[in-house]
Image (spheres, coloured by chain):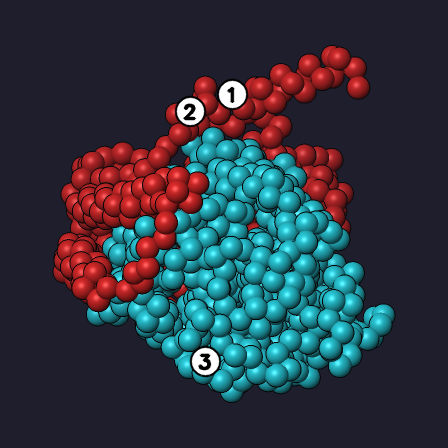
């Protein structure tokens, strides 16, 4: 190994040690006080109990270290012979009980506050999926998925990590401030746990059951969290981003979402040229598919199949549509029927059949997909 | 094993010595041989589980994925937990009990020697089966050592069936070991050794054995329910068939919480033997120690849902489990106070076993404090499933249970091998371990409070620095354990000759027999020494 290599490695290690420090204030020590009344009570409780523990530790360890220094044989200490004292033993059983009661009182009060059953002004259903969240605004007919948006290159260390590495998503959960919001939590597959530290809300999302939690956010802002219950391979890659806005902004946002939905529905009905679909499809592909199948469609051998020159993308169109809509069980290929709109599905399938040298020249129309989605739902309902 | 050969020559009154060759170890019914095998097995598992921990810490050294895939990372966290709990800590305690319980109570052997052989020899097969899953298609269990359904049933890799059978075998082994210890302690004490004269290590093990008998069948039950769900079409844990995934957690933690005391009560016993020996003063509050241990054991059945504060239990349930959990601080506190009172006005020296025992008292207590914080249900919503929990249970298990085991090994090694340890090497091992363990696990409190969930292979940038510190500490701690291996082997092979009472202040029947202990001890019931009369 030449001197230069050693130097390179040396500076590499040096940089690695320094880089995170210089980029971010990363020596965070404590719980966040958060932005809700409940989260502040939790923080206060946390600090109270912490200081009580510190005080007890000082007394106990103080006596212990005093004995260690003064009652050592090397200093000529002779062992005394006492080995029990009922009074002392009763005292150090009763005093801790009193301290515990002192802790239990504020803890009970906070817990009762957290379990406040009063009605909420906004209900949001949160569904955990492997490995993404789905948010349903129950009174507003609005529903969307929220996926990790950190590019794969950052995770595999080929490009520099950005500030919100692993804590950023494609669609935020937008919530109004000063509003009692009720979360109804469930899961589609395994148990997940929805946790946003700044709200002091952590509740398990359990398949087949519905859990409840609530919050009232005081300050507008962006609050990040993560799935807290091990839910399989990509458990570390399903963050939560809450965007709290004031109520007017929230109403405007809701309206915009409704309009976008209508536009999408209208878009599915009009006819699309191949070029338009390809353009749309590329965007959808990069957002929803490229993480596994890669932007060039070549996939990762052994893990994620290539789409370029693949039998699916060049074969029967209905089989291709089926796999995109319904996924492939036993593999990482998910069902996208609920995650993408008819227009997006049509565009992305068209894109896959006509990109990277795949050139079938045929377009899948949004109307065709919309019919398929409609008729299958109909069948399922019968 | 040269030591046992010397033991043979050292005592010519013995009826017969050990058999020769491999057969001795396969067919032995001698509690000392079986104890030795348990201890070596547990050391091997400690090193295997430790290497997995180092793999985890190496991946977490920096943000981003560097060394392993997320799927393999999950296999490592799962196997690390299972191997350390069932392969390292529990067999080490059983090994210590095998060696020491008969010698402490003046019995010639365990009450059920053939079953003793069987309960050990199940273990290597159980762990061979568990570890073989790493090489199966789909990989080893990847659902965490708590194996929550349905991740461990519907969504599990095919190797889960091997995992289930391995757990069954470990459970059978533990139950047989526990029966043996109970039968031995209740029936085979030397004349005059009443229950309230029993050495504390025997008391804590007796209570632990009852816990084992109570909860290992529950563990067997829950894995059997998984087996049925996976292969026989039942729906215990599948809401789609009328079951409930949370039922799994209730059953698992009804086993799991007593299990954590199974891993700490014998440690309390060891520490209660060592501190009086090196403080040259009787244990303070013997009776309250016994009652405290029993209270902890009883309370351990009433607190399981504190592991499940976020699954959505009603307010009354949260309050009950919070109060019951907080109550455990009382008997645990009594124990710590008694240890400190034993040191107070003693005449202390600080040989290696004592150093580990003192570190145990301080660091286990720190783990106890974080445990008390975790008991507070509303705050637990913020701590649950974060690195704060990881810090907590590693503080009670590594500088807790593992340090106690090491303290016990260093304390009794002269009795086992007939040689004194090289104190300088013992101290080197202690200080490197002490520093390493704190550098590893203390920063995890901070990472957890800052919001890092456990069981993730990659993390956001604000957790980077403390993770790097923890990883460096883990390698320091891990590598220093090689000194421990060296120390044990060196002590087996030679060293200053140990006297019958290897430590000046050591009391108890085990120190009345020569060092190394002859192959058969107490064929005739002994007369109790002055200190026990």
Specify the quadrant of the image occupied by residue B7. bottom right
For the residues carrying marks 3 and 1, which lies nearer the camera in this image?
Answer: 3
Left or right for A94, reference B516: left
**Residue closer to the observer: A310 or B253:** B253
Badge 1: chain ID: A
CB under 8 Å between discs 3 and 1: no
The quarter of the picture where the N terminus of chain B appears is: bottom right
Badge 2: chain ID: A
Residue under label 2: A24
Q: CA distance from mark 2 to mark 3?
A: 64 Å
Q: Tell me which chain appears red.
A: A
Q: CA distance from mark 1 to mark 2?
A: 10 Å
Q: Tell me which chain appears cyan.
A: B
Q: CA distance from mark 3 to mark 1?
A: 63 Å
Secondary element at image label 2: loop
- Neighbor class of circle 3 (other Cα within 10 Å; few <14, some 14-19, many 20+) is some
Residue under label 1: A18
Expressed as whole percent of the image width and height from the top left, the position of residue A16 reads: 57, 24
């Amino acid at each position: 190994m030449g001197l230069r290599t050693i130097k390179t490695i040396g500076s590499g290690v040096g940089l690695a040690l320094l880089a995170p420090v210089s980029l971010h204030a990363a020596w965070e020590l404590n719980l966040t006080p958060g932005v809700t009344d409940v989260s502040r009570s939790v923080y206060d409780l946390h600090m109270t109990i912490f200081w009580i523990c510190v005080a007890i530790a000082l007394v106990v360890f103080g006596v212990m270290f005093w004995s260690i220094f003064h009652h050592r044989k090397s200093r000529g200490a002779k062992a005394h012979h006492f080995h029990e004292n009922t009074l002392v033993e009763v005292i150090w059983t009763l005093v801790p009980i009193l301290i515990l009661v002192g802790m239990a009182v504020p803890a009970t009060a906070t817990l009762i506050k957290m379990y406040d059953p009063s009605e909420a002004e906004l209900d949001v259903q949160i569904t955990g999926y492997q490995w993404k969240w789905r948010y349903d605004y129950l009174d507003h007919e609005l529903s969307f998925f929220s996926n990790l948006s950190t590019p794969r290159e950052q995770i595999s260390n080929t490009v520099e990590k950005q500030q919100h590495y692993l804590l950023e998503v494609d669609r935020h959960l937008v919530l109004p401030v000063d509003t009692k919001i009720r979360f109804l939590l469930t899961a589609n597959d395994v148990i997940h746990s929805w946790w946003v530290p700044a709200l002091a809300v952590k509740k398990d999302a359990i398949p087949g059951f519905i859990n409840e939690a609530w919050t009232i956010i005081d300050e507008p802002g962006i609050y990040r969290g993560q799935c807290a219950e091990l839910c399989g391979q990509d458990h570390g890659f399903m963050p939560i981003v809450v965007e709290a806005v004031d109520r007017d902004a929230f109403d405007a946002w809701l309206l915009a979402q409704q309009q976008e939905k209508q536009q999408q529905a209208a878009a599915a009905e009009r006819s699309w040229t191949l070029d338009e679909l390809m353009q749309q499809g590329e965007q959808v592909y990069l957002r929803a598919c490229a993480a596994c199948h890669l932007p060039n469609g070549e996939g990762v051998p052994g893990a994620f199949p290539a789409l370029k020159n693949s039998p699916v993308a060049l074969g029967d169109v209905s089989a291709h549509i089926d796999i995109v809509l319904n996924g492939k069980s036993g593999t990482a290929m998910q069902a996208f029927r609920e995650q993408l709109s008819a227009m997006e599905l049509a565009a992305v399938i068209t894109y896959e059949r006509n990109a990277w040298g795949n050139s079938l020249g045929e377009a899948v129309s949004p109307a065709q997909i919309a019919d398929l989605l409609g008729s299958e739902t109909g069948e399922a309902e019968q | 094993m040269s030591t046992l050969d010397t033991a043979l020559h050292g005592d010519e009154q013995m009826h017969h010595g050990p058999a020769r060759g491999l057969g001795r170890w396969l067919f032995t019914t001698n509690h000392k041989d079986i104890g030795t095998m348990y201890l070596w097995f547990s050391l091997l598992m400690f090193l295997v589980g430790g290497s997995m921990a180092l793999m985890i810490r190496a991946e977490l050294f920096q943000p981003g994925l560097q060394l392993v895939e997320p799927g393999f990372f999950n296999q490592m966290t799962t196997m690390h937990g299972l191997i350390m709990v069932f392969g390292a800590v529990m067999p080490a305690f059983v090994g210590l009990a095998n060696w020491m319980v008969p010698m402490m109570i003046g019995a010639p052997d365990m009450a059920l020697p053939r079953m003793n052989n069987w309960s050990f020899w199940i273990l290597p097969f159980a762990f061979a089966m568990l570890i073989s899953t790493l090489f199966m298609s789909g990989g080893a269990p990847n659902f965490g050592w708590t194996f929550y359904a349905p991740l461990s049933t519907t969504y599990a890799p095919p190797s889960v069936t091997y995992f289930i059978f391995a757990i069954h075998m470990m459970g059978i082994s533990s139950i047989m070991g526990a029966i043996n210890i109970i039968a031995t302690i209740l029936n085979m004490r030397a004349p005059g050794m009443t229950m309230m004269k029993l050495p504390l290590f025997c008391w804590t093990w007796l209570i632990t054995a009852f816990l084992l008998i109570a909860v290992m069948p529950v563990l067997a039950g829950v894995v059997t329910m998984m087996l049925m769900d996976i292969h026989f079409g039942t729906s215990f844990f599948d809401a789609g068939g009328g079951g409930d995934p949370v039922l799994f957690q209730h059953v698992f933690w009804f086993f799991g919480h007593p299990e954590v005391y199974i891993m700490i009560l014998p440690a309390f016993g060891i520490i209660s033997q060592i501190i009086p020996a090196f403080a040259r003063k009787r244990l303070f509050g013997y009776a309250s120690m016994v009652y405290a241990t029993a209270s902890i054991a009883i309370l351990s059945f009433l607190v399981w849902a504190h592991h499940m504060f976020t699954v959505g239990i009603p307010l009354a349930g949260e309050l009950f489990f919070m109060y019951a959990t907080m109550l455990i601080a009382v008997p645990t506190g009594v124990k710590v106070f008694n240890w400190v009172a034993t040191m107070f006005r003693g005449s202390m020296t600080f040989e290696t076993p004592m150093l580990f025992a003192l570190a145990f008292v301080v660091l286990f207590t720190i783990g106890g404090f974080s445990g008390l914080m975790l008991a507070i249900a509303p705050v637990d919503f913020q701590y649950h499933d974060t690195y704060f929990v990881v810090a907590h249970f590693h503080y009670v298990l590594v500088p807790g249970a593992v340090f106690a085991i090491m303290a016990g090994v260093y304390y009794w090694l002269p009795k086992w091998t007939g040689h004194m340890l090289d104190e300088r090497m013992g101290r080197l091992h202690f200080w490197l371990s002490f520093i390493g363990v704190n550098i590893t696990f203390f920063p995890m409190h901070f990472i957890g409070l800052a919001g890092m969930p456990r069981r993730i292979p990659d993390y956001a940038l604000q957790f980077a620095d403390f993770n790097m510190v923890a990883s460096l500490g883990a390698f320091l701690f891990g590598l220093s354990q090689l000194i421990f291996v060296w120390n044990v082997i060196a002590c087996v092979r030679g060293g200053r000759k140990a006297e019958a009472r290897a430590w000046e202040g050591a009391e108890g029947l085990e120190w009345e027999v020569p060092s190394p202990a002859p192959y058969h001890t107490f064929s005739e019931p002994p007369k109790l020494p002055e200190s026990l009369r």
